[in-house]
Image (cartoon, rainbow, N blue to C red):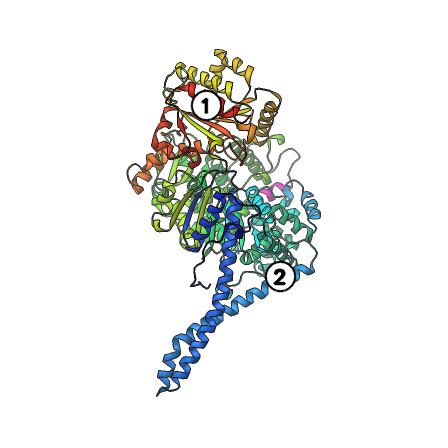
Amino acid sequence: MYSPRKTLTAPAAQDFGFPYTPYAIQEQLMQQLFLVLERKQIGIFESPTGTGKSLTLTCGALTWLRQHEQLVRAELLQRIGEVEAELCRLQAASAQAEDWITAQSNTRAQREELAQLQRLRELLQQKEQQLDQIKQRQKQQQRPARRAGELLLQAAAAPSAEDIATEPELNSDEDEEEADEHTDHALAEQPTEERFRDVQIFYCSRTHSQLAQIVTELRKTPHGQHARCIALGSRQQLCINAQVRRLPNLALINERCLDMAKAKASSHAIASKKASQSLSRCAHKAPAQLQKLSDAALSEPLDIEELAAAGAACGACPYYATRAAQAQAQLVLLPYSLLLQRSSRQQLGIDLRGAIIIVDEAHNLLDTIAQLHSSELSLGQLQLARQQLAAYKERYARRLSSANLLRLNQLLFVVRRLLQLLESSGEPRLLRTYQLSAEGDFYNIDLHALLQFCSRTRLAQKLHAFGLRLQREPQPSENRPPPTQQLLQRLAAQHQQCLTGGKRKQPAAKEPVTPQPQPKSSVVPSSAVPSPLRPFLAFLETLTSNAADGRVLLNPKTCTLKYLLLNPAEHFADIVSEARALIIAGGTMQPTHELTAQLFAHCPERVVQRFYSHVVPADAVQPFVLPTGPTGAKLCFNYAQRASPAMLQELSMVLQNLCGVLPAGVVCFLPSYDYLDTVYGHLEQSGALQRLGQRKRIFRETAGSGSGGVGGVEQLLQQYADAIGQNAGGALLLSVVGGKLSEGLNFADDLGRGVIVVGMPYPNRTAPELKERMRHLDETLGSGAGNEYYENLCMKAVNQCIGRSVRHIRDYACVYLLDERYASARIQQKLPAWIAQHITVASDGFGAVQARTARFFKARS
Ligand code: SF4
């Protein structure tokens, strides 16, 4: 990689390839982003939802990249010319030198630099040739028939037990290499120093649909014509092998795919000979087909679904094609999980050195990192793991090598000891990882070696296959399956019970177990039950991490063991150090202090923070803080006061009065489902619900099945939207902060002319996890950091609620924050800039708020 000497300056708005004339804040964001990338900084950008943030970031980053690449090429060639001229001049001068050694030494530095530059030029030319070849090949090929591909993918049927690999014993696997994870087609990754490495942009967001939106927007820009963009996904999203796609979970899909690769790769090994009898190499991994799909993917931006369809149409595996193509891509789109986990990056061959990383929708980045690296294990999973391991050992004990038998016994020992801890009674406790292994009495077992053994022998997959194989064994009588099959059937049913909420302790069982027959109707197919060994191994993995970075919550009441990552920085440090520049962006990034304190404390000089206003005019949003209600009584919805009759009555009057002047849709967010029920009950009993109903149709979000699941939420929103259209007075939607409607949904225009946030939704401070996190922050960042985190959790949730409304430049709405605590300047600093700048604390009484609201909407009617 060549670092240019000249510095780029941010171009004018019209030179960013933006598809429309950018608004002022879009222009500012693109220019600031450009400078951050050029100066190798870390940018934290807040740009409200509805301001075209993703498109702005994409255009800004691709514009910088294009200019940077042009500069690198031009400077490299110019520098070679300069050094060659300098060398000639020195050689001529050295010819006059008296001895050969002096002559050589005079020109050594130039010769070395020239050799280095020439090598870089060679690599650059190789790369340009490769890209030309891709273009040429792509021109000759027909565009993949995507529709045909979609039909092919839809033809894949439901999971079937017959599709699961059969893989018997562990013997002979010990010396075997892990299945070849590397594709072998022509574009396969070259050693980094053997290719010219341009800067790559890795753009990650929460979901594939958000990434698909970026592809759609990219196509509208000039960048869409020439930028090489690749979307990365898992095999679950990209596999096109019908037999493999049918498998019920990602772990099984991964294993089967690797097995198929191994069928060819390791035919020398005894165990694999057996495997290869039942498995053949996947037909979709043919190099020529992969090449074709890679070329197509690099030639035009495709989202994950389009890639899968294109792969199905040409018979090439999109997972391996995109994996191979990503090294050539300028823009790589990927979900959080693939970027933020080191193991995923390694698996996909992602090299972040010198790269630009854009993390979008990053308002919960710290929590996301913590979640991705935490792990939970239930009693049911442990019981099932113990019983499967015991059954496996019972079947193969005499055929296992002593080394493998020892490892199996160690696994069983750890499982049993964890079970004993969970089956003990007592209060939830937080332990350091070494305390858990000491209490469990397995501190002297080398967990690293145990994990390596499981990985090398692919024990989890084999146990799963073992269970399925047993199911297919002939039954001795019509009515009674063989004992081991009964065991596995019972275990599968037990596990399913655990998954569906029956998490109470199962009676402890001794191994080997003599199972009771189960009625056939209650048996859950094992193929649909994930291997219990996987969560167990994931949990063991966390026990090998740095003891200071996390805690284990041992909770006999919920029968769970949970590893909590307390130090996200540990898992983000290599991203910060390797990347050239990092962009952390979101619609509501405030408050950002804990983000900078936890992730960037060691490099504060690199951090640039910008909080952009909304694209709407300043008078299109009217935010109020209501410290008092219509009677003049103070509004304080803390836990102690919020359910008091006086507070409920005051809230009831606020809602009635505001709904009297707010047109169309009003969304009211309450701190919890319980409190929503309390408020609803009060409105009902006091007759206020009826009075409200005469003005607006009333809807409420419920924690249970009423609006549960995506379908339930969609149905509720549809009814709410219909009511706004049909009822002259509009509708009121009672919702919950942090509930199903508070993130990711769009209450634009008439769906959200008013947003009311009732109280400050602080989480339960006594929860062991939260307490430990706060204590850890106090210890590591200083006294008060825990409280700051606690308050920030609350304010981030509030900001998400506020961000549901005002979604585009012609939108407008009023926002009401009901609680005297919002009047504090400290709290207001944690609101989004576009709200905080215009907020009015209604100190002159509720009547004035009502009057201003009426005027606000009259001016827009
Ligand atoms: S190579 Fe691709 S298509 Fe074949 S099984 Fe693996 S992921 Fe699926």
Name the residue tied to disc 1: 852
Q: Is residue 296 left or right of residue 537?
A: right
Name the residue tied to disc 2: 134
What percent of the width, then of the height, locates residue 291?
A: 63, 59
Nearest to viewer (mark 2 / mark 1):
1
Q: Amino acid at mark 1?
A: Arg
> Which residue is rendered at x = 48% and y = 15% of the image?
683
The one of 277 and 335 positioned closer to us in this rendering: 335
Q: Quick check: 797 above or below 723?
A: below
- Contact between marks 2 and 1 (CB within 8 A): the answer is no
Numbered label attached to residue 176: none
Instruction: Say what secondary structure mark 1 lies in.
Output: helix
The tally of labels here is 2
Is 469 included in the stretch rendered in magenta?
yes
> Which residue is rendered at x = 50% and y = 58% of the image?
67
The one of 795 and 658 positioned closer to us in this rendering: 658
Indicate the quadrant where residue 521 lies.
Answer: top right
What percent of the width, then of the height, locates residue 385?
A: 49, 40
Q: CA distance from mark 2 to mark 1?
A: 62 Å
What percent of the width, then of the height, locates residue 767?
A: 38, 31
Instruction: Say what secondary structure mark 2 lies in.
Output: helix
What percent of the width, then of the height, locates residue 298?
A: 60, 56
Is 464 included in the stretch rendered in magenta?
no
Q: Quick check: 255 above or below 135?
A: above
Q: Quick check: 551 above or below 682?
A: below
The one of 152 and 442 positioned closer to us in this rendering: 152
Q: Residue 702, can we see it?
A: no
Report the magenta residues as a range: 467-480
Indicate the quadrant where residue 808 lies.
Answer: top right
